[in-house]
């Protein structure tokens, strides 16, 4: 993984913690959350305050998430909002923490100036021994305070102030006044600068989890389903698919209007995207056969294609037929859900499930390493560890050169606007005629 780290493709934008004051604050928060401390004098933390260096030191990458379903967090600065989230167990966690920090940014800025803020993402579920427990998770509540209890003290002080104002003889109550003064020394003037971090709730309806080998749970769609990498047995939801059930998954995605063909996607250069997917497939095929790909330029990869001939992967041949049609050089290809190229030809449709569906498509089209890196880093890092050094070098160089320089632009061109934005009507790359079949039938009279 060193190559990815050096190129800023892994552990990028982590927050450095090196000042003795911040290290001491972090240790107090660690002690309060998990009863442990670090002996490191400098380290880096992610969005949740997790440190990979401390995880290595303790031999426990889940020291802030021991039960894997109620993640704790430590905030030393609001700048953590822009850091990545490592060891992600649930796909919804990042968006929730980002929103919590953004919503309470002014309060958190003031609080972290004096102390660390610590909290927990409460799911109401305390163990994950069975897959059925995932379905009990429907709501996440984020609760937080400083290690010194400033938020709780401010709430208590506000109550005492209200009592002082309501009681006619409050100004004579020496005990009440002494309590207010004592709390005010800790919190400051809460009448002018209120300190509040009200518990914030988020629905947990559809999500991916790394538990049980990897599971996608879709509940807020027309036809709910659970999709797992491995068989999960009996669970209180139907249908249940494994990733090998391609036909069933394709039909379910279509019935829920969760995908769109890349040749119809608005704002996408379909031909360029298809070519790049074909390049990735060639690199994978060449690597498995031990073929030389030179500097992996398209001209070199074309030589690999000539060498393989009719032994080219079915994914490459299917996308090649689609590319010929897009460029008006071939007939409309028939690519059904049984064809290995099928899921390479789709992206998630606009909507709230976009990112989750793109994660699923990344698993169903694993040779598209760019999509995998962008939408499913956990899968990417696990796959990267199994690749040959030649493929690792190619992928790392490509991502540094073609993605890192304009990450937001690449994401927008591949997947469209962020969920919740006005997507408008889809503008196809070509006029596809009446919609039937996997992408829509062609009006043959045009030819």
Image: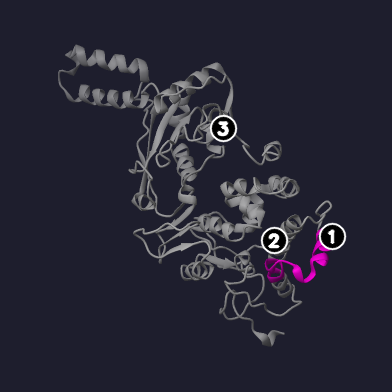
382 or 257: nearer the viewer: 382
Dot 3: few (<14), some (14–19), or many (≥20) neighbours within 10 Å?
A: some
Residue 248 visible in the snapshot: yes
Q: Quadrant of residue 318?
A: bottom right
Earlier residue among tags 1 and 3: 3
CA gap between label 3 and label 2 equals: 33 Å
Residue 52's disc is: 3
Q: Which residue is mark 2?
A: 277
State the quadrant of the N terminus: top right
Residue in the image at 72% along x and 63% along y: 278
Earlier residue among tags 3 and 2: 3
Q: Position of residue 253 (x, y in %)?
A: 50, 67
225 or 98: nearer the viewer: 225
Q: Is residue 442 left or right of residue 199?
A: right
Q: Which residue is mark 1?
A: 299
State the quadrant of the C terminus: bottom right
* Magenta-drawn segment: 301-319
Q: Is residue 397 above or below residue 173?
A: below
Residue closest to the far bottom:
445
């Amino acid at each position: 993984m060193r190559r990815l780290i050096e190129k800023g493709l892994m552990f990028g934008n982590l927050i450095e913690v090196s000042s003795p004051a911040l290290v001491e604050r972090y240790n107090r928060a660690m002690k309060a959350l998990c009863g442990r401390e670090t002996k490191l004098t400098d380290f880096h933390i992610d969005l949740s305050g997790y440190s990979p260096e401390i995880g290595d030191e303790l031999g426990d990458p889940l020291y802030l998430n021991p039960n894997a379903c109620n993640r704790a967090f430590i905030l030393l600065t609001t700048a953590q909002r822009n850091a990545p989230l490592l060891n992600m167990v649930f796909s919804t966690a990042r968006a929730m923490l980002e929103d919590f920090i953004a919503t309470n940014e002014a309060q958190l800025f003031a609080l972290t100036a004096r102390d660390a803020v610590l909290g927990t993402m409460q799911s109401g579920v305390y163990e994950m021994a069975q897959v059925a427990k995932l379905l009990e998770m429907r709501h996440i509540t984020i609760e937080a305070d400083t290690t010194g209890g400033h938020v709780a003290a401010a709430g208590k002080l506000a109550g005492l102030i209200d009592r002082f104002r309501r009681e006619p003889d409050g100004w004579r109550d020496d005990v009440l006044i002494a309590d207010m003064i004592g709390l005010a020394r800790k919190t400051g003037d809460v009448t002018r600068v209120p300190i509040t971090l009200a518990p914030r709730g988020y629905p947990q309806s559809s999500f991916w989890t790394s538990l049980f080998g990897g599971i996608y749970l879709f509940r807020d769609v027309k036809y709910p389903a659970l999709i797992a990498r491995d068989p999960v047995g009996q669970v209180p939801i139907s249908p249940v698919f494994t990733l090998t059930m391609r036909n069933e998954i394709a039909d379910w995605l279509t019935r829920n209007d969760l995908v769109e063909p890349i040749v119809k996607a608005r704002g996408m250069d379909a031909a360029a995207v298809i070519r790049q997917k074909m390049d990735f497939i060639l690199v994978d095929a060449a690597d498995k056969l031990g073929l030389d790909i030179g500097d992996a330029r398209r001209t070199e990869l074309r030589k690999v294609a000539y060498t393989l001939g009719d032994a080219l992967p079915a994914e490459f041949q299917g996308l090649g037929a689609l590319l010929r049609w897009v460029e008006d050089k071939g007939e409309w290809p028939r690519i059904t859900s049984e064809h290995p190229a099928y899921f390479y030809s789709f992206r998630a449709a606009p909507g709230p499930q976009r990112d989750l569906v793109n994660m699923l498509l990344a698993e169903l089209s694993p040779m598209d390493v760019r999509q995998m890196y962008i939408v499913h880093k956990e899968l990417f890092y696990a796959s990267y560890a199994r690749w040959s050094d030649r493929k690792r070098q190619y992928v790392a160089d490509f991502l540094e050169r073609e993605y890192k320089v304009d990450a937001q632009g690449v994401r927008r061109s591949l997947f469209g606007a962020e969920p919740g934005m006005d997507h408008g009507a889809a503008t196809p790359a070509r006029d596809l005629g009446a919609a039937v079949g996997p992408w829509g039938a062609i009006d043959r009279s045009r030819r």
